[in-house]
Image: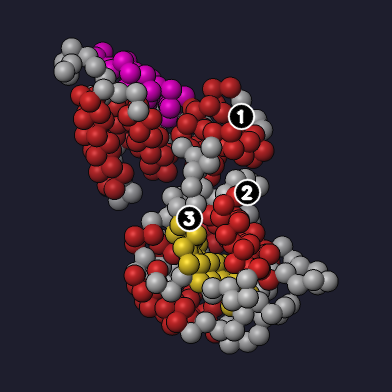
């Protein structure tokens, strides 16, 4: 997906580059799906470029080092090498940080600068954070660090204090529509509208939503919130829309969609409904934390999700 928006972030970054002493450490902060990783790669490409020197793509540039969680096992590594979707480990290890540090003792290959992108710094193991701190405290000449982070509060104060924070904000609906039309031109009408709503200003989130084909589930969830479900019919439709045996990834996505439906409903609700929304959202947050490790029966989990959404509706049972 081509990077769209974030004009202010570009302005700050390019002003720093034009200065005489650019800071060596940058935290790219904002919620997941905004395009921070894409920004980091594009910004790194600008940083290492030299006039008159042909530059490889960021993915294969010898002076751009990207650290991200490795494939979870050998089978997943084969999928990665074949260009297929693959499952990653949960964390970036200390060995990965030390591996890059060993490469930093030499000079950059094509110019005077190089960039180390950590995507995401939230995923660093404790030992990896401590190892990274050494490089942030005494950065090698010409080396710049770009730390993508979705929850800046999870970073140690010692890391934050050594970096400049560059904040990323949700895109406007018009920018979202443009980004999705470029990335997924097959989307139209209700599917495009649902993806934009589900993304809440984050094009990566919206695209992932669209790829999972959850537009129908979004519409059913919105009806559950608005109408309730006294006869369980809508909950049955929700289960059907997600398939007979949805996998864990699809179930996690369904929980996230349900949470976003509740957030969208908050603005148009009265005080009594807002209280019910807060309670339902808290319960969904608990489910989101349990679902990656608990062995939920999909049908029962979807019934629970549908029930929480229906509990928000103003029916005879919960009318204020």
Report the residue marked by disc 1: 187
Residue 25 lies left or right of residue 256; in this view the side is: right
Whole-percent x and y of residue 194? 50, 28
Report the residue marked by disc 3: 167
Q: Label 2 near label 3: C-beta < 8 Å?
A: no
Residue 102 position (above or below residue 215): below
Q: Label 1 near label 3: C-beta < 8 Å?
A: no
In the image shown, does 160 or 307 lie closer to the viewer?
160
Residue 185 position (above or below residue 47): above
The region drawn magenta spans 216-243
Residue 76 lies left or right of residue 107; in this view the side is: left
Number of marks in the rendered image: 3
Element under disc 1: loop
Nearest to N terminus: mark 3 or mark 2: 2
In the image shown, does 48 or 56 lie closer to the viewer?
48
Q: CA distance from mark 3 to mark 1?
A: 29 Å
Q: CA distance from mark 3 to mark 2?
A: 15 Å
Q: Main secondary structure of the magenta part?
A: helix
Residue 112, located in which quarter of the rendered image? bottom right
Report the residue marked by disc 2: 3
């Amino acid at each position: 997906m081509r990077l769209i928006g974030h004009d202010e972030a570009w302005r700050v970054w390019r002003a720093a580059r034009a200065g005489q002493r650019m800071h060596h450490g940058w935290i790219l902060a904002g919620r997941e799906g905004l395009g921070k990783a894409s920004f980091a790669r594009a910004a790194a490409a600008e940083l290492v470029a030299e006039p008159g020197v042909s530059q490889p793509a960021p993915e294969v540039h010898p002076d751009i080092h990207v650290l991200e969680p490795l494939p979870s096992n050998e089978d997943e590594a084969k999928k990665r090498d074949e260009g297929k979707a693959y499952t990653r480990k949960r964390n970036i290890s200390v060995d990965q940080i030390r591996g890059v540090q060993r490469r930093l003792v030499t000079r950059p290959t094509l110019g005077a600068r190089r960039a180390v992108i950590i995507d995401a710094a939230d995923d660093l193991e404790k030992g990896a954070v401590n190892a990274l701190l050494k490089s942030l405290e005494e950065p090698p000449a010409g080396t710049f660090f770009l730390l993508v982070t979705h929850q800046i509060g999870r970073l140690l104060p010692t890391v934050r204090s050594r970096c400049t924070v560059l904040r990323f904000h949700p895109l406007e609906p018009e920018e979202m529509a443009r980004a999705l039309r470029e990335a997924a031109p097959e989307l139209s009408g209700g599917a495009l509208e649902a993806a934009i709503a589900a993304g809440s200003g984050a094009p990566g989130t919206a695209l992932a939503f669209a790829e999972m084909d959850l537009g129908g589930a979004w519409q059913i969830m919105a009806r559950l919130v608005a109408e309730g479900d006294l006869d369980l019919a809508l909950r049955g439709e929700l289960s059907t829309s997600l398939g007979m045996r949805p996998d864990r990834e699809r179930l996690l996505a369904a929980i996230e969609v349900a949470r976003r439906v509740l957030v969208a409903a908050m603005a148009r609700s009265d005080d009594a409904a807002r209280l019910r929304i807060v309670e339902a959202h808290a319960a969904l947050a608990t489910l989101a934390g349990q679902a990656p490790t608990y062995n939920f029966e999909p049908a029962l989990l979807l019934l629970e999700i549908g029930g929480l959404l229906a509990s928000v509706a103003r029916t005879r049972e919960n009318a204020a």
